[in-house]
Image (cartoon, helix red, strand yellow):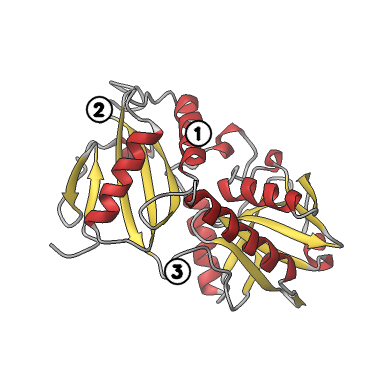
Amino acid sequence: MAANNFLCFNGDFLSSEKPVFHSQNRAFRYGDGIFESMRAIGTTVPFLNLHLERLRKGSRFLEIELPEYFTFEFLSKQISHLLNANKQFSGARVRLGVFRKNGGSFFPISNKADYYIESSSVESTNFQLNSKGLVIDLYPDYRKSINPFNSLKSIPSQLYIKAAIYAQNKKLDDCIILNENSRIAETTSSNIFISSNNRLITPSLSEGCLPGIMRDIIIQLAVKEKITVFDDACITDKDLIEADEVFLTNAVQGIKWVVAFRNRRYFSRTAKKLNQSLTDFVQSLSLQ
């Protein structure tokens, strides 16, 4: 069987070319589940413990019962097994999905969980800063509401898909999603940071953005680099125009620097500095 052709479903390693989910699957029928997108370096995920913690919080909120064996050690072995089976030894994107077991309508028959893990290759063996800066703009059509579901990396993603299609049509690299107060929340797949006068600013979680794993890591690294961080800010497009730098973060790609927002152009000094800190941090984890 060709490489990159296996997935894990409830502990069984199956061909990704064959049907896996039943038509009664609740993720398909109701979006009744959550997921984590992770970056593997080698055959391990450096921040798996943080992803698992967020997954557990989301499962408790949705009242999906994870099995007792769903531990860090168990998932580490499952992911390593999958990456070896797919011959992805240098780096990969790993998606772990959890959803309620089949059956029922809005009234579930069971709250117990099914899960799957899939992987796909990435080009770089570590987090690499993009050589060409991104061009971004606001998504103007719809707003993201602010509510407790914002803390979930949930399967229903219509707003993000609509914004991504808008970006494609406008030949943008990404789009900024505004919250119900017309302030900046995040982009289609990332948290957003602005840098100005050695200050790093990112929207507060109360603004409706996802509590990103890489967001937290970059904040911690910035503090170590003696950069003043404001992680409880309210940001508008005016703040982007006045910023020295803008960059995006997510758990798969790390840091992505932005070269342009409308007519404003940016440099990437802070993004480069923090990307080096991120690379060094990941290497230190591999030595432990």
Residue drawn 31% across the image and 24% down it: 112
**Front in this rendered view, residue 132 or 91:** 91
Snapshot quadrant of residue 269: bottom right
Measured Cα–Cα span from mark 1 to mark 2: 27 Å
Cβ atoms at labels 1 and 2 below 8 Å apart: no
- Residue 103 shows which numbered tag? 2
Q: Nearer the viewer, mark 2 or mark 3?
A: 3
Work out which residue is located at the far right of the displayed protein and give it. Answer: 197
Q: Amino acid at mark 2?
A: Gly
Residue 77 in the image: above or below residue 242: above
Q: Amino acid at mark 1?
A: Glu
Does any portion of residue 154 appear in the rendered image?
yes
Does any portion of residue 140 appear in the rendered image?
no
Counting labels gives: 3
Measured Cα–Cα span from mark 2 to mark 3: 41 Å
Residue 23: give x, y in percent of width and height.
21, 41
Disc with the residue nearer the chain's start (2 vs 3)? 2
| In this rendering, position of residue 194 left or right of residue 33 | right
The crowding category of the residue bearing disc 1, from other C-alpha atoms within 10 Å (few below 14, some 14 to 19, many at least 20), is few
Dot 1: element? helix
Disc with the residue nearer the chain's start (3 vs 1)? 1
Q: Amino acid at mark 3?
A: Ser
- Residue 53 shows which numbered tag? 1
Dot 2: element? loop
The crowding category of the residue bearing disc 2, from other C-alpha atoms within 10 Å (few below 14, some 14 to 19, many at least 20), is some
Q: Nearer the viewer, mark 3 or mark 1?
A: 3
Residue 131 in the image: above or below residue 119: below
Residue 38: give x, y in percent of width and height.
44, 51
Snapshot quadrant of residue 200: bottom right
Work out which residue is located at the far left of the displayed protein and give it. Answer: 1
Dot 3: element? loop
The crowding category of the residue bearing disc 3, from other C-alpha atoms within 10 Å (few below 14, some 14 to 19, many at least 20), is few
